[in-house]
Image (tube, rainbow, N blue to C red):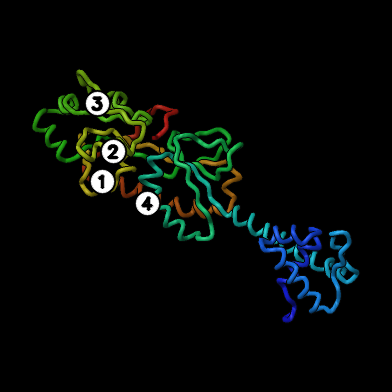
Amino acid sequence: MRDLNLKATEYFEAVARLGTVTRAADELGVSASAVSQQIRALEEQFGVKLFRREKRRLILTLDGDRLFQTTGQAFAALRNARSSIARGREMRALTLRTSPSFGVRWLGPRIADFAETAPEWNIRIDATPDFSAFETEAVDLDLRYGGGGWPGLTAECLMHDFVLPLCSPAYLERLRDEAEGPEEMLGRARLIDSVKAFYRWDSWLASNGLVVAGLGQSFRFDRSSMAIEMARRGGGVALDSAVLCLDEIESGELVPMLPQCPVIAFPAYWLVAPPQHFNRRIVKRFHEWIAPEARAHEARARELLGRDCSFAAPDARPQGLLRG
């Protein structure tokens, strides 16, 4: 096999299969003269004619036909193997969907660590508040924010959420200088509302027995990441998720506005998919990676918030809203 001219054999197979030098040259991406030259080299190597020309057509000789039967099968097998490998490479992909704020603030900074554990896999993340329609979309998993209980789907809670009013230290100091007591402070505060969150200001105030005259929200965002950033920059008080801004709480950039009011804690972040998806190899690997990451983050949040705040699990919580 060492003296077999593989390039000439490839060119010969293309001409024999396609019927003309021109068509073979187009498929191979070379000139017609280059194809003709390789065919002549192969005929010289074998010492026989492989084609005869009849009315501008190339007809295989007996020897040429014998060679084509073998090379045709060999190159067809190679093409099939290449296609199979390409399909397999395309199938080595994890596609998941997550809410934009969770994707940016929690998953995004961590997903590179998972990628290092699965370097042979492609990873696609769609950041959208819309849940996947698994029966029509090619999505492996959803990372959902919600109350659980989605019919026909397996849902595993990854983390509890911890909701409380948060603001910058400078903003809190200003409120304390201007007002006394929670109601008066809230009445003077610029409240930042995450309109797609489970907990809004009205339900939070009711659960804490607070009555604020003239309550109004100065800012309304459909993304928690925007509300959190506004609060961090001293723009007001955000009633939002400590899970999404734990780094800012730990660094002191955000502080609880009313630590005497209990933190609302409830199961909120879920890994969701049809039951059979959890048998997929890449889904299992992702699950094995994300579950301890989520547990560690929740434990860190509980420990950090517990230094100044108490926790209260509500009797009921609003259903059907999404975390932006």
Q: Which mark is residue 218?
A: 3
Pair 4/1: label in front: 4
Give the Cα distance between marks 4 and 1.
14 Å
Give the Cα distance between marks 2 and 1.
9 Å
Q: Which mark is residue 282?
A: none
Whether residue 137 can be seen here: yes
The residue indicated by pointer 1 is 248
- In this view, the residue in front, 267 or 34, is 34
In the current view of this chain or complex, which residue is farthest to the left? Answer: 177
Looking at the rendered structure, the kind of residue marked 2 is Ile
Element type where label 1 sits in the image: helix
Count neighbours of disc 1 (C-alpha within 10 A) and say few if under 14, some if 14 to 19, many if 20 or more. Answer: some
Q: Are marks 2 and 1 in contact (CB under 8 Å)?
A: yes
Q: Are marks 3 and 1 in contact (CB under 8 Å)?
A: no
Across and down, in percent, residue 286 comes to: 50, 52
Across and down, in percent, residue 196 comes to: 38, 30
Q: Quadrant of the N terminus?
A: bottom right
User: In the figure, is residue 29 to the left or right of 61?
Assistant: left
Query: In the figure, residue 184 lies in which quadrant?
Result: top left
Looking at the rendered structure, the kind of residue marked 1 is Glu
The residue at the point 21 percent across, 28 percent down is 190
The residue indicated by pointer 4 is 109
The residue indicated by pointer 2 is 228
